[in-house]
Image (tube, rainbow, N blue to C red):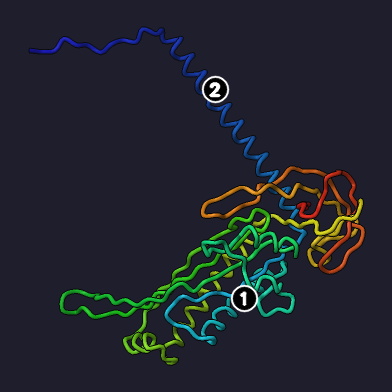
């Protein structure tokens, strides 16, 4: 039996159907145009903000790196950290970097605040750093070094290849929010011969030479990522003293401030609860403006141009 079902003709007149399609196309084009316009305006605003922000140098403190790998030793750890520090300073020459062995390293950061759980108290740490005009706190860790072998080749031509894999981590705390600015994991795999493989496992210096070259390359990669994160972070400073209509700012000449600069003042922000007992700053609203009147290297005095509720802890933006 053959089916008598025929294709159903459209009940819409062809002219009306054409009109509906035309309207839909116009709506789509108009929508795309609006989206493109919005995107252009957004990108322009971002560029303008970066231009106004780019003159100022940020201050970052680099805490001593931790080492949880099987290879320990002051010389080994110092070599890795020094390589990272040197490369970070080269790539971020514009910004002020404070290393653990610097005389200006804040004494209060040698013993970090902890929650009852034992975790680092980022909220308290951000509070401490704000008083020093610190924008970023950078931490690093040599997480692990492990070993593995692979049989490579075809049939009876297979042989054993020896590998060392290194894991590291680099993170930064944004003191404006008390949250992480970035948190990057790194991994490098090094192929070695059997002799070096055994020497590295036994922590013999002869085998560690090749691995140190890999660690230097890893430190360079970490420094580049760290500097990129620092570049994208907005500049902030904080009011650390108030006397009538005069305020003291935790940034000065080294941050790029100049006499006559005006900065917007924002409420210090309300704390909001996070997971596992952590707290964060919820950015506050704009409450006034100040104008720089005197400068030193790392602080400034300013006159309150507008605003009546400016207090210690208030944030400053260009």
Q: Nearer the viewer, residue 87 or 100?
A: 100
**Viewer-side label of 2, 1:** 1
Residue drawn at x 41%, y 91% is 204
Label 2, residues with CA under 10 Å away: few <14, some 14-19, many ≥20: few
Q: Is residue 99 visible?
A: yes
Q: Residue furthest left?
A: 1
Q: Nearer the viewer, residue 242 or 295?
A: 242
Q: Nearer the viewer, residue 134 or 258?
A: 134
* SS at badge 1: helix
Label 1, residues with CA under 10 Å away: few <14, some 14-19, many ≥20: some
User: Is 218 drawn above or below residue 308 in the view shown?
Assistant: below
User: Is 82 drawn above or below residue 94 in the view shown?
Assistant: below
Measured in 3D between alpha carbons, the distance from the residue under mark 2 to the one under mark 1, in whole angstroms, is: 57 Å
Q: Residue furthest front?
A: 116
User: Is 227 drawn above or below residue 33 in the view shown?
Assistant: below
- Quadrant assignment, res 180: bottom right
- Quadrant assignment, res 297: bottom right
Q: Is residue 52 visible?
A: no
Q: Which residue is mark 1?
A: 85
Question: In what quadrant of the picture does the N terminus appear?
Answer: top left
Q: Which residue is mark 2?
A: 26
Q: Position of residue 207 (x, y in %)?
A: 41, 89
């Amino acid at each position: 039996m053959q089916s008598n079902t025929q294709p159903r003709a459209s009940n819409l007149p062809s002219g009306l159907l054409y009109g509906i399609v035309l309207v839909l196309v116009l709506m789509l084009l108009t929508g795309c145009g609006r989206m493109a316009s919005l995107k252009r305006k957004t990108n322009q605003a971002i560029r303008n903000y970066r231009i106004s922000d780019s003159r100022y140098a940020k201050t970052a403190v680099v805490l001593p790196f931790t080492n949880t790998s099987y290879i320990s030793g002051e010389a080994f750890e110092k070599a890795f950290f020094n390589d990272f520090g040197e490369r970070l300073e080269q790539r971020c020459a514009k910004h002020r970097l404070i290393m653990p062995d610097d005389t200006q390293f804040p004494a209060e950061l040698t013993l970090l605040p902890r929650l009852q759980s034992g975790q680092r108290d980022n909220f308290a740490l951000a509070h401490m750093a704000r008083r020093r005009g610190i924008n970023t706190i950078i931490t690093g860790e040599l997480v692990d070094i492990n070993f593995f072998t692979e049989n490579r080749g075809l049939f009876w031509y297979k042989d054993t290849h020896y590998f060392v894999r290194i894991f590291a981590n680099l993170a930064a705390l944004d003191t404006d929010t008390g949250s992480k600015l970035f948190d990057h994991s790194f991994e490098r795999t090094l192929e070695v011969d059997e002799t070096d493989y055994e020497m590295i496992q036994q922590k013999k210096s002869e085998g560690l030479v090749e691995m140190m070259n890999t660690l230097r390359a890893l430190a360079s990669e970490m420094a580049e990522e760290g500097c990129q994160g620092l570049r994208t972070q907005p500049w902030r400073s904080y009011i650390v003293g108030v006397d009538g209509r005069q305020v003291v700012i935790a940034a000065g000449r080294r941050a790029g401030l100049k006499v006559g600069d005006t900065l917007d003042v924002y409420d210090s922000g309300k704390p909001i609860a996070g997971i596992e007992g952590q707290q964060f700053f919820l950015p506050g609203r704009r409450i006034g403006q100040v104008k720089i009147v005197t400068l030193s290297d790392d602080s400034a005095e300013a006159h309150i141009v507008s605003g009546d509720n400016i207090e210690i802890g208030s944030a400053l933006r260009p």
